[in-house]
Amino acid sequence: MISFLNLKAINKQYEEVFQEKMKDFLEKGWYILGDEVTAFEKEFAAYCGSKYCIGVGNGLDAIILSFKAYIEMGNLQIGDEIIVPANTYIASILGIMHAGLVPVLIEPDLATYNINPALIEEKITSKTKGILVVHLYGQLADMDAIIEIGYKHDLLIVEDAAQGHGLSFKGSHTRTFSFYPGKNLGALGDAGAVVTNDEKLAKTIKALSNYGSSQKYHNEYIGFNSRLDELQAAFLRVKLPYLKKENESRRTIAKRYLTEIKNDKIQLPFYDDTDSHVFHLFVIRTGNRNQLQQYLTDNDIQTLIHYPVAPHKQASMKEFHHLNYPITERIHEEVLSLPISSVLSDEDVDFIIQALNRY
């Protein structure tokens, strides 16, 4: 069976250095907010072209803490509306809601699966104060158009880059990241970060993530306990220098899929052959997804569905159940993710392509 994502094989190449990091970690005896976290924050900020990075517990917390910090700073108020793509992973929407803000769902562009800028302005009201952009599946959203809209309407822009490690970002907006193990830059457990050029925002997020405290036992805010784990930071530091190579491997496989899969029953993703896509996922669409997925399973190819249920159809989102998002619903009914990673062999890729062309 060709696995969808062989995390054991991906991390095997770093195992010797991981063991050394683990030994150093145990010998230091400093388990929370130590040198590894500080070093990773500095290195990841530099990698992203940002001044500051704040390591947090996970990608969802990164979104919540960013919006909470903007509320503490007076840029947002409880109950403000934040525009967000309707077809995103539910964490994007949860992050808005947990911060006490109101998500306003916008349909995506069917070609790119990212938020459709042409539909944003019609949903802007006097309560709209921001846009949470999501670079879904690893593809850069249309930031030129979104930035123009944000500037025109004085909207805060935050980017959910949980699937976009290594993208060439546009502008100096605040960005949130997840280092969930399956990400292009994945930890060996939960981890996340926020990067920004805003010093006040960085300090506020840092304090909020540490019980609302920037000085021990002095609590300025009603805070959280969401800190990047020292050991995960050590592992992420090992892997960060190889992120560019990982992304290039994914692009190489994606280009083969795009040029060699030839089947009218399969809709391939949009790609303009630039660095605007890091292919966290390679997502195809088909009219009879269950049949195709079963066919691939029968041919020893594991696939996954990202995501089978649209956020506004989830049981937890009853307030959205009456809304109609036909493009989003179609996407969630048709998408199927193929295996793609740096440990996929040429022979594996050949096999997958041939199987799809026979379907």
Image: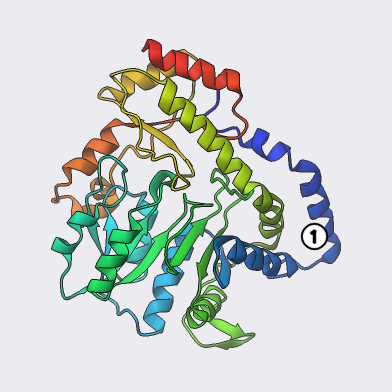
Q: Quadrant of residue 71?
A: bottom left
- Regarding residue 32, the answer to whether it shows in the image is no
Q: Say few, some or many: other residues with alpha carbon within 10 Å of mark 1 (under 14 / 14 to 19 / 20 or more).
A: some
Which residue was labeled with disc 1?
25
- Residue type pointed to by label 1: Phe
Q: Position of residue 131 (x, y in %)?
A: 30, 65
- The answer to whether residue 28 is above or below residue 91 is below
Quadrant the N terminus occupies: top right
Q: Could you say which is closer to the camera, residue 32 or residue 18?
A: 18
Q: Position of residue 16 (x, y in %)?
A: 81, 43
Q: Quadrant of residue 104?
A: bottom left
Q: Position of residue 345 (x, y in %)?
A: 61, 24
Q: Which residue: 35% across, 68% down?
A: 157
| Disc 1 element | helix
Is residue 328 rendered to the left or right of residue 173? left
Q: Could you say which is closer to the camera, residue 162 or residue 48?
A: 48
- The answer to whether residue 99 is above or below residue 328 is below
- The answer to whether residue 356 is above or below residue 106 is above
- Regarding residue 270, the answer to whether it shows in the image is yes
Q: Which residue: 32% across, 54% down?
A: 142
Is residue 285 rendered to the left or right of residue 183? left
Q: Position of residue 238 (x, y in %)?
A: 72, 52
- The answer to whether residue 67 is above or below residue 286 is below
Q: Which residue: 53% across, 52% down?
A: 166
Q: Which residue: 52% across, 15% down?
A: 351
Is residue 65 rendered to the left or right of residue 14? left
The extreme right residue here reads: 27
Quadrant the C terminus occupies: top left
Q: Could you say which is closer to the camera, residue 320 or residue 258?
A: 258
